[in-house]
Image (spheres, rainbow, N blue to C red):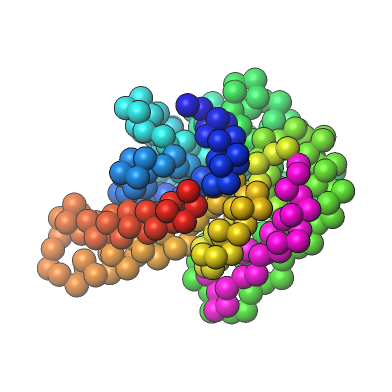
Amino acid sequence: MSLKRHLQKARKDKKAIGQFNFSTLDQLQAILSSSVSLNIPVIVGTSVKEATFFGMAEAATLVGYYQKKGAKIYLNLDHGRDIETVKKAIDVGYNMVHFDGSKMDFEANIKDTKRVVSYAHKKGILVEGEVGYVPGQSAMNKCDLPDVDVVAIEDVVCFVKNTNVDLIALPFGSVHGIYSQAPKIKFKFLKDVSRIKPFLVLHGGSGVKDDDIKKAIKLGITKINVNTELRMAWRDGLKQSLKSSEYAPYSLLNKSRSNVESRVKEKLLIFW
Ligand SMILES: [Zn+2]
């Protein structure tokens, strides 16, 4: 089944597909095995930095290999900010791309997103666009929550009409990274945009309360991105392993892998 079909089915059944990022093989294997054991589709994401570390073609080849074996796993380029990088991901076999023009001015964002969509759709690849900036970074932060952009519904409608994106990331109140307080989801805004055609994407899924996530899915969120929580689980596992005198990588990374696997499973059971 194609990613588009999975998204359509998820929206109809009021479920969401999780996107989990990776930059190492053990993380990718952990996400895959959570998805396979629960029989729930997943999107795996690489930011540009993660893709540079892992290799774009390598990521696409491996995910393609898992797909041939029957896994419901799909690869997305997360926050691609220039057209060339996004095109490269499409050319090497990514299943979808997220073009993030949210830092550009509105007209330029529409123009460039439109170009990405026309290139991607010729090859049957889905495009996620973004309007309004989702702040923060995928890291642990002790400072206060940053302010979240407010976007007018008319701008969202105008963007969708002009670009024909398949998915759209909007500032729903969540932020990238984990902060001392949990972010508050803007349910009213979510309700107001829930009638638009593209699938709605919630970035910064780490640190949002489970009940808020469930409510957001009921109101129309179809894809949720999680990164920071997985990075923390991976790091905690490694820290624990490094306390032993072990030096074989396969032993050292075991705990990281199982930590990531359990965290992804927890998320999938909330989202699906
Ligand atoms: Zn994001």
- Classify 218 as above or below 108: below
Image: 130 above or below 65: below
Residue drawn at (70%, 53%), measured in percent from left and top? 170
Q: Whole-percent x and y of residue 263?
A: 37, 59
Dividing the picture into quarters, in which one does residue 231 lie? bottom left
Residue 57, x across and y down, in percent: 43, 32
Query: Measuring 60% from the left and 39% from the top, which residue is drawn there?
Result: 12
In which quadrant of the rendered view does residue 42 lie?
Answer: top left
Q: Nearer the viewer, residue 69 or 107?
A: 69
Magenta residue check for 96: no
- The image shows residue 228 at horizontal and vertical percentages of 47, 62
In the rendered image, the residue lying farthest to the front is: 13
> Which residue shows up at 54% across the image and 47% down it?
16
Is any atom of residue 267 visible in this view?
yes
Magenta stretch bounds: 172-196
Q: Is residue 13 left or right of residue 250?
A: right
Q: Tell me if I can see residue 52 in this picture.
A: no
Which residue occupies the extreme left position in the image? 245
In the image, 200: left or right of 109?
left
45 on left or right of 105: left
* For residue 129, side relative to residue 252 (left or right): right
Q: What secondary structure characterizes most of the magenta part?
A: loop
Residue closer to the observer: 75 or 47 = 75
Is residue 178 covered in magenta? yes
Q: Nearer the viewer, residue 110 or 247?
A: 110
